[in-house]
Structures are given as C-alpha cells and as structure tokens.
Image: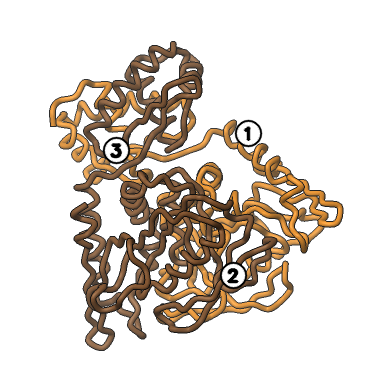
Chain colours: A orange, B brown
Amino acid sequence: MEKMKRAERMVAVMQVLMSKPNMLIPLTMLAERFGAAKSTISEDLLAVKESMRCTGQGRLETVSGAAGGVRYIPEISAEEAREFLVNLAERLSSQDRVLAGGFLYMTDLLYDPSILRPLALIFAGVFREKKPDVVVTIETKGIPLALVTAEALGVPMVIIRHGNKVTEGTSVSINYVSGSSKRIQSMTLGRRALEPGRKVLVIDDFMKAGGTALGMINLLKEFDADVVGLGVLMETPREEEPKLVDHYLSLLQLRELDPFKGVVQVIPQNSYLSL
Amino acid sequence: MEKMKRAERMVAVMQVLMSKPNMLIPLTMLAERFGAAKSTISEDLLAVKESMRCTGQGRLETVSGAAGGVRYIPEISAEEAREFLVNLAERLSSQDRVLAGGFLYMTDLLYDPSILRPLALIFAGVFREKKPDVVVTIETKGIPLALVTAEALGVPMVIIRHGNKVTEGTSVSINYVSGSSKRIQSMTLGRRALEPGRKVLVIDDFMKAGGTALGMINLLKEFDADVVGLGVLMETPREEEPKLVDHYLSLLQLRELDPFKGVVQVIPQNSYLSL
C-alpha cells in the first residue's frame, strides 16, 4: 500500500477501529497494514484519542504489553442520551399507539436500528463496569434490543425460548407466571447455550410485575450464572404494580394507558436521567 | 468548542459519520459542530473519502443540494468477505455441532455480533442496489441476522410471528408447510407493521425445502409488498432437496450432515464467491 499522509492515515486507522468496536487490534497489525512504524501509529493514536475526547461518541482504550493493542469503545454522551429518551417518550405517548386490550404498540420502534443503537449505548454505558460476559433475553420482542446491547458491550447474546420444545440437546426448563397474562408458562435454555458461572446482563423490552424477569433469573441460577445487571426499556409504575425483582434499571415509565379514553403517557425515568 | 487542527477535525467528523451509518448528515450541522466553514468541511470530506478508498471497509456518499449532506455506507471488502465465509464454514463443520435428529448446532454463531456484522455487510453489499425499504424475517433464530442486515442497509426490520395470536390490532395469517417438519403451521403479520407497497428484503438463517420462505413471500403479497431479494445464511444442496423458491442468495451450503456417523461438512457457496 502506498504511504499515506498523517491525517489520512489517522482517518483510516480510525475506520478500522470503529468497524470492529470492542475488539482489541494489535498495534503491529495497524503498523503493517498502513506501512508505518509502530511508534508512528502510537503517535497517531494519541491524536485520535484527543479528537474523540470532544465528540462524546466513543473513546479509545489502549492495552499495553506484548498482547496489547487498542480498541474502540462506542459511547453516547449524557446530553444526547437524555435528549433521545425525552424524544422517544414523546413518540410513544401518542394516542394512536393505544391497542385494544390495553397494550401499547411499540414494535415499530423496538425493531428499528436507529432507535435501538442509542438505547444499546445507554445500557452499555451503565452496565459496562459490571463486565458481563454475555447478554441474555427471552424471545421475541426483546431480542433486537439485547443484540445491539451485546454488540455495544462486545459480548455474545443468548436467547431463552418459550415452551420446552427446544431441539438443541440437553436443556433446562422452568415454569413461571407472567405478570401480564397471569398464566403459568415455561421457558427453556439449552445447556450448551451458556457455560456455567458466567456474568450475565439480562435485557428485556417491558416489565410489568416482573414475573418473566424473575423466571429468567431463576432459570439462570441453574447455570450458576452471576446476574450482574437487569435492564428493561419500559416498566409500569412501581407504586401501582409491586415488582417481583429489585435492582433493575428501566429507561422509560408507562405512567398511564387507558384504552377507553385513548390516553397514553410515557415518561423518561428520573432514576436514569440523574445517574 | 475550541478550534481543532485539521487532522483532528477529520477524525472527529469521521467518528460522527460512522456512529450514524446510512444517516444523511447535513454539512451545515458538521460546520456548526466543529466551528469551521462549510467549505473547510467539504475539503476535509474529500480527504476522508480518499483515505477510505483504500481500507475497503466503507465509503462516504455525498448528496448535493439544499437538502444535501454526507452519509457513511459501511462495507466489507471482497477479500475479507471470502476469508470470513471460509472460516465460518470451517467452524460449522465441526463434529461436536451435530445434534440428535440431524440438526446442526449454530445458535452460538447466529447470536454473536462479531459473526453477524460481517454477514450483514455481505448481504447489504449484494442487496443495496435493490433499494429495499425494510428487511423482513420470521422469528426466532433469523432475527439477529435480519436486524444487523437492516442496520447495514439503514432500514427498519419487521418480524413475522409464528401462530396467529398476535395482539397488535388487525393482522393477516397464512398457513404454510415447513420443509423440515412437514406439518402445517401458521404465520402472522400485523397490518400496522408493514405499509402496503414496500420493497422488501427477506432474510432467514436456514433454508431446506423453502416452505417457510415461500410462506413469507405469500404473506407479503397480502401487503402488496415487492420482494426485491431473499437471502439465507445456509441451505441444503439444491440437487438433494428441490426448492420451492427460486432467485435467492445463500452464503453457505450444508453439504453433508450424518448424525449416525457424526459427520458434517459446510462449504461457502461458489455462487456468492464468484459474484
């Protein structure tokens, strides 16, 4: 490859790092790829770090030593996160989202990458320090949110299935009572899907009484998992519906939903905004 | 914000663009944010474009005019794609992935963002020119692949649900015969989930006879959708199992799977490698 000017090399190095977020890239690899000395790449990286400091959209983490290198950690600034959640709450507080039966239509947003990405960065920002090995969710609506959160953290995702007809070798099932339907249901996870003793972050889209979340936590106990965090996008008010789990982070609250009056109000959670 | 040096500004501009792939960012926004003239930002972008040309990992697309701006299109180089698929086929051709009943264990890879991201860039690279408005899949295992493909293309995703117990207003259900189980099953999509007349890219993880894919295509007809592409990660050999659908792209072929001998062989598809 022809030699590049410094600014152009910095941009190219940046592109390589941002294309593989959370992955440790050895300096030697960058030096070889861009035909520059390792010391030159190191200097470039210092300047790159400096320019990132002011965007609030991610940072470089350098790991020294023989097995060292550099990785790009994607982030969202507190200001952007706040603005995004206020906006999202407003979009969800729309009368035409009220469904018969007292449900709130939100799948369009839950499946939209441009909505999911900021949410993932918010969850990753909060839970990164807990160093989860894996993000766990239950099918179906929470899968996209769990996946992007896993990617933002640089870890894989595991999906707990409904029922017990899983065809993936030995599996563990438990019964649980979902808060919304009050019926006994079952959920299953293959033994092979999760090694024993992993640190787990549980992510789901919605929490009412927390029966599903509690079921997941109980199922994960069978895998000797250490649940280091639980994050949900939205919950009903705690004072209205006592929760079966404590210590979780929800980003939005469904303050009011009246299918008869056609009224819905979603608000951002102060607990997150004041973090 | 204090004034930045050119190289540092280029890196910061790049970070803003790469953090919001496929999104059109107005030059005025960048100019304001970095306290530089629009003409300066334009010059920066030309240099950024140039340095990207040689990484093969994405490009800038500029849109001129009043509503114009610049967007980052993520890509994967042909060489990286080929190497990745050869590697993935090898990882899948492992004896310990053979499950009772003649299934192949692959959920660990299907739920891993570091595997999904390159696959998404491969699908996006092939189907971008068809300009899909939305990526459609059916629950559950194909959801992560469909989501990352949607993000790589900058469009939302829609999930078809199994059964017909969807609680999201009016919905359309059809019956279909899945090739693997030979049983009649049903799938459902809410009217609200997909506007009529959209261009749709269908993505799924596995195709045997193609019964599920055909079912999705038939269901999408009820939404006047124009199916502009169908991509699956893996298929069984066409000569062994005639397919119910034509014109699709599969990236891998499950050439052999013998649960009695414990033999499995997965190969990359020549049809893709020779594109």
Please identify the quadrant where the C terminus of chain A is shown: top right
Q: CA distance from mark 3 to mark 1?
A: 29 Å
Q: Nearer the viewer, residue A173 or B250?
A: B250
Labels 1, 2: front one: 2
Q: Are marks 1 and 2 in one subunit?
A: no
Mark 3 lies on residue: A16
Residue A99, numbered circle: none
Of label 3 and label 1, which has the lower sequence position? 3
Report x, y in % for residue B227: 44, 56
Helix, strand, or loop for circle 1?
A: helix
Helix, strand, or loop for circle 3?
A: helix
Residue A88: name its quadrant.
top right
Q: Is residue B152 visible?
A: yes
Q: Amino acid at mark 3?
A: Val
Judge whether B205 appears above or below B41 on screen: below
Mark 1 lies on residue: A83
A43 left or right of B69? left
Q: CA distance from mark 2 to mark 3?
A: 44 Å
Q: Amino acid at mark 2?
A: Ser
Report x, y in % for residue B213: 42, 68
Q: Is residue A274 visible?
A: no
B45 left or right of A40? right
Labels 2, 3: front one: 2
Instruction: Specify few, some or many for label 2: CA neighbours under 10 Å numbering under 14, 14-19, or 20 or more.
Output: some
